[in-house]
Amino acid sequence: MRIFSGIQPTGRKHLGNFIGAIRQYVDGQARAVEADGLAIFCIVDLHAVTVAYDPVELRELTYDTAALLIAAGLDPARCILFRQSDVAEQTELCWLLASVTAHGDLNRMHQFKEKSEVQRELISAGLFFYPVLQAADVLAYRCDEVPVGEDQRQHIELMRDIAERFNARFADSNELLIAPQHRIPEVGARIMDLQDPDSKMSTTAAAQDGTVYVLDQPEMIQRKFNRAVTDSDDPPRIAVDPQKRGVSNLLEILAACEGVTPEEAAAELSGARGYGDLKAAVSEAVIEMLTPVRERYELLRGDEAALEQVLLRGADQARAIAAVTLGEVRSAMGVGPVT
């Protein structure tokens, strides 16, 4: 079994990122080791340059992300952790895969539509081409599985189409490229904003009280959950219900922290006096989950030289794998010298 996933270094990582992606990485690492497979994780700094950004901040955020991933449980001795821009094979593969990627497919990508709406001065071609590079990131490593959040489902479906189209055109329908499966968590795939439970938790939310960050101090986490939107039911009813989005979101978070279903989390609170008890239970569970991560992060983040060495070693390992795939793709496409 081989697992791959990438994470952008931009923005402060929040609870939705942690539950929907980062915890999946740690779980994937364990499953890959157990199956004598390989887990590969990439900090995708090249994806980050498709929107407006600050170059100095990008470098800092890359180290932030590396430290956070290791603090959360990724072990460079048990997985490959690297920086995307250090492996040029992925960017060359991106260009080659463009030959079997339909313009119309890219034009239908929800993420492009959403992000291009806020790029008033310049909608970059890189943003449009983003899913092709993402496909190259994964297909370069012939992975079976990609742990992602719900918002990446469409991109994984596109990369499967690209792999299958490439194999049909250049590999006589053999699996030169492997079409991977997505792995989306059953609980916590979409963590919603605490102040606006109709919207996903985000670093760009208008009200910062709606977003819990992985590195928030316990008192800040508690304050944000105390202010979380519920509803006006009287008496209060703690239940999973599409009409009770704020309450359902809190139960989803509690369930993800405890490793149970939202319905089981609701049953645990059957004797609660009201929504205050629900908020207290969720904040306590989140604090217990995130505190060790924050503490380990603080120990790791100050040593940038050590983080850089982790990323460079990982890039060497990743490059050795990606170069084999790229060589076979070049050969199949008739690009470059005969090998």
Image (cartoon, rainbow, N blue to C red):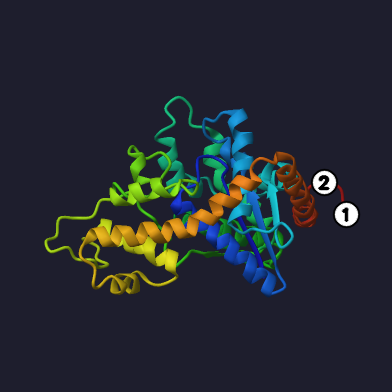
Mark 2: few, some, or many residues within 10 Å (few <14, many ≥20)? few
Q: Please identify the quadrant where the C terminus is shown.
A: bottom right
Asked if the residue under mark 2 is in contact with the one under mark 1, i.e. CB atoms within 8 Å, the reply is yes
In the visual, does 338 lie left or right of 86?
A: right
- Residue position marked by numbered label 1 in the rendering: 339
- Residue position marked by numbered label 2 in the rendering: 336
The kind of secondary structure element at disc 2 is loop
Q: Is residue 237 above or below residue 62?
A: below
Specify whether residue 25 is in view: yes
Indicate the position of residue 151 as horizontal and vertical percent values.
Answer: 45, 54
**Front residue of this view, candidates 59 and 268:** 268
Indicate the position of residue 248 as horizontal and vertical percent values.
Answer: 29, 62
**Front residue of this view, candidates 68 and 83:** 68
The structure residue drawn at horizontal position 57% and vertical position 39%, both measured from the top left corner, is 48
Q: What label does residue 289 carry, if any?
A: none
In the visual, does 63 lie left or right of 266?
A: right
Residue lying farthest front?
219
The kind of secondary structure element at disc 1 is loop
Residue type at mark 1 is Thr
